Image: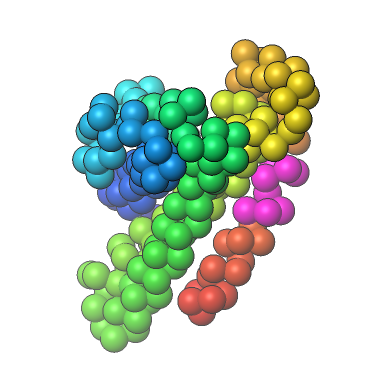
């Protein structure tokens, strides 16, 4: 089915905004549970997307991707976390970092349910509701799975990098942290070399397959 650019924006915008907003809020919320209220005091434990918008990552990049492809990706302003305030800084930071991808997995399940409801609505003759809901659900599954898996790549400042730094012995973690200034370049090289697809693809497709089969989706 051919859809217009405006329709594509309508289908992808809501799942993307929720994906990146709740990802960041999850980091701040879990940090507050472990003793760091930096995000709460800065007003970032809010579900209001405006508080989390990064104009490049939340607006410009997704729109450009949507124009040239059938997929969009983006990011929000990172929620501030002061690891020194955590009860057990190294251990607790692992849970704080895992909270973002964990929230994306839960949202992928939510959008799987929405897609299923859309399919049911379409089958009952309510295509006006079922078609957009099923398309939005499929977009939500894809966005959240890719965002969650990509963030688990062990490169600082991605969540996977933060997890690895806090699991490594302190001396090794200190040496590993020097990679951070070069992480963006490494990611770009992985993307253009096609290696990122080999790293992220199998895990992402497996999770999408599990969720679509869980809800009986094609």
Front-most of residues 152 and 141:
152
Residue appearing at x 61%, y 66% in the figure:
209
Inspect this view and state whether residue 30 appears.
Answer: yes
Residue 77 forms part of the magenta stretch: no
Residue 95, quarter of picture: top right
Residue appearing at x 26%, y 27% in the figure:
42
The structure's colour scheme is rainbow
Residue 126, quarter of picture: bottom left
**In the displayed structure, would residue 149 be above or below residue 166?**
below
Main secondary structure found in the magenta portion: helix
Q: Position of residue 109 (x, y in %)?
A: 45, 65
Residue appearing at x 39%, y 45% in the figure:
33
Which region is colored magenta? 197-204
Front-most of residues 4 and 60:
60
Position of residue 156 in the picture relative to residue 63 (left or right): right
Residue appearing at x 63%, y 18% in the figure:
180
Position of residue 156 in the picture relative to residue 175 (left or right): left
Position of residue 57 in the picture relative to residue 7 (left or right): right
Q: Position of residue 208 (x, y in %)?
A: 57, 62
**In the displayed structure, would residue 176 be above or below residue 17?**
above
Q: Position of residue 161 (x, y in %)?
A: 64, 32
Residue at the farthest front position: 87
Residue at the farthest bottom position: 124
């Amino acid at each position: 089915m051919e859809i217009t650019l405006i329709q594509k924006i309508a289908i992808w915008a809501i799942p993307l905004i929720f994906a990146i907003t709740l990802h960041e809020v999850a980091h701040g919320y879990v940090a507050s549970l472990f003793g760091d209220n930096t995000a709460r005091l800065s007003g970032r434990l809010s579900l209001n997307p405006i508080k989390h918008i990064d104009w490049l990552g939340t607006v410009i990049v997704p729109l450009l991707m949507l124009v040239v492809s059938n997929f969009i990706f983006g990011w929000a302003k990172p929620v501030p976390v002061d690891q020194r305030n955590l009860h057990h800084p190294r251990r607790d930071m692992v849970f704080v970092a895992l909270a973002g991808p964990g929230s994306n997995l839960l949202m992928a399940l939510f959008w799987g349910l929405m897609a299923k409801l859309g399919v049911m609505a379409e089958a009952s003759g309510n295509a006006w509701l079922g078609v957009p809901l099923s398309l939005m659900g499929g977009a939500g599954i894809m966005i959240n799975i890719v965002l969650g898996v990509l963030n688990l790549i062990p490169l600082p400042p991605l969540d996977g990098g933060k997890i690895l730094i806090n699991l490594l012995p302190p001396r090794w973690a200190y040496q590993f942290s020097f990679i951070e200034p070069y992480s963006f370049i490494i990611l770009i090289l992985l993307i253009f070399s096609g290696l990122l697809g080999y790293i992220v693809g199998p895990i992402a497709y497996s999770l999408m397959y599990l969720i679509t089969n869980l809800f009986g989706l094609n």
